[in-house]
């Protein structure tokens, strides 16, 4: 209603400037008498209003992500929503909601923002090409000592539709995704108070495993995946021999492995 009032106001203001007289109720409106420039201006104003409305929805969605408010977030999605990942896999609304809930469980101190490359209004639909940024701390609720700062940069093409309750997101096609996190920004396994030679060896093994995990899952490096499997197998074997430091290191590595695997499966 506010948009309609604004458009009518703009139309009458433009028309009055050239001496146009509004017809009486008994007269029919001859649209051909409308000045083309005024109509074009109104159309442009309408599109700008729609663009601003869509931008505000993105801002509200980012705020919901930062609060981990899953219900508020998905109130901006259409029931028929679907997403297409980099691998071409299609995900529906229910599947995406479940994945985002997992994402929220392992991420804290979230900061989300959007940048827009193109917003095209096509009557009752709109297409948006933009970049989304998410920063946060990857955590493990069962292990407070585990954390890793992450930064994700995703370029996508979103499709929206106009509804009686505002613009709703109907499709997201991921065009690119970058994990810009610092690869070695992660926790160390718990160590005994006295540092021994073995402690340093396990710490080095832990750091190497963390780097290999990032390379294996994010860069899809098969060679590094094989190296990672060997390290994890060795640590597991030593742990089975009641080596407490090996167990600590193995637990920390496997937690990070599981968290990274979950994160990559969600974002890709």
Image (cartoon, rainbow, N blue to C red):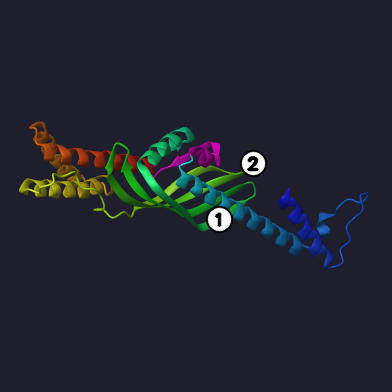
Q: Furthest-left residue in view?
A: 197
Q: Position of residue 185 (x, y in %)?
A: 26, 53
| Disc 2 target residue | 165
Residue visible at 21% across and 41% down? 252
Is residue 171 something one can see in this rendering? yes
| Disc 1 target residue | 119
Q: Position of residue 15 (x, y in %)?
A: 82, 63
For residue 51, the mark is none
- Comparing 107 with 125, the one in front is 107
Q: Position of residue 263 (x, y in %)?
A: 34, 42
- Comparing 74 with 222, the one in front is 74
| Picture layout, residue 13 above or below residue 87 | below
Is residue 87 something one can see in this rendering? no
What whole-number distance in Å separates the C-alpha atoms at marks 1 and 2?
20 Å
Q: Position of residue 116 (x, y in %)?
A: 50, 57
- Give SS at disc 2: loop
Residue visible at 92% across and 51% down? 27
Give the residues drawn in magenta, as a range: 70-89
- Give SS at disc 1: strand
Residue visible at 88% across and 57% down? 22
| Picture layout, residue 147 above or below residue 34 | above
- Comparing 97 with 117, the one in front is 97
Residue 91 part of the magenta segment: no
Q: To which quarter of the image does residue 31 belong?
A: bottom right
Q: In the visual, does 39 lie left or right of 152?
A: right
């Amino acid at each position: 209603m506010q948009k309609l009032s604004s458009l009518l106001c703009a139309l009458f203001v433009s028309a009055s400037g050239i001496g146009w007289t509004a017809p009486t109720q008994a007269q029919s409106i001859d649209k051909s008498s409308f000045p083309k420039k005024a109509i074009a201006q109104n159309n442009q104003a309408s599109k700008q209003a729609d663009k601003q409305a869509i931008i505000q929805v993105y801002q509200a969605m980012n705020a919901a992500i930062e609060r981990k408010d899953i219900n508020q977030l998905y109130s901006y999605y259409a029931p028929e929503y679907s997403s297409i990942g980099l691998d071409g896999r299609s995900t529906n609304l229910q599947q995406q909601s479940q994945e985002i809930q997992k994402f929220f469980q392992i991420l804290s101190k979230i900061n989300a923002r959007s940048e827009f490359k193109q917003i095209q209004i096509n009557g009752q639909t709109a297409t948006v090409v933009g970049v989304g940024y998410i920063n946060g701390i990857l955590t493990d609720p069962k292990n407070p000592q585990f954390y890793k700062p992450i930064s994700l940069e995703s370029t996508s093409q979103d499709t929206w539709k106009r509804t009686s309750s505002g613009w709703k997101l109907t499709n997201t096609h991921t065009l690119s995704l970058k994990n810009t996190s610092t690869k070695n920004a992660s926790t160390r396994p718990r160590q005994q108070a006295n540092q021994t030679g073995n402690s340093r060896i396990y710490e080095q093994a832990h750091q190497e495993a963390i780097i290999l995990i990032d390379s294996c899952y994010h860069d899809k490096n098969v060679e590094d995946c094989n190296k990672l499997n060997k390290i994890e197998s060795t640590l597991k074997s030593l742990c089975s021999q009641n080596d407490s430091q090996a167990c600590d290191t193995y637990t920390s590595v496997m937690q990070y492995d599981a968290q990274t695997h979950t994160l990559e499966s969600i974002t890709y």
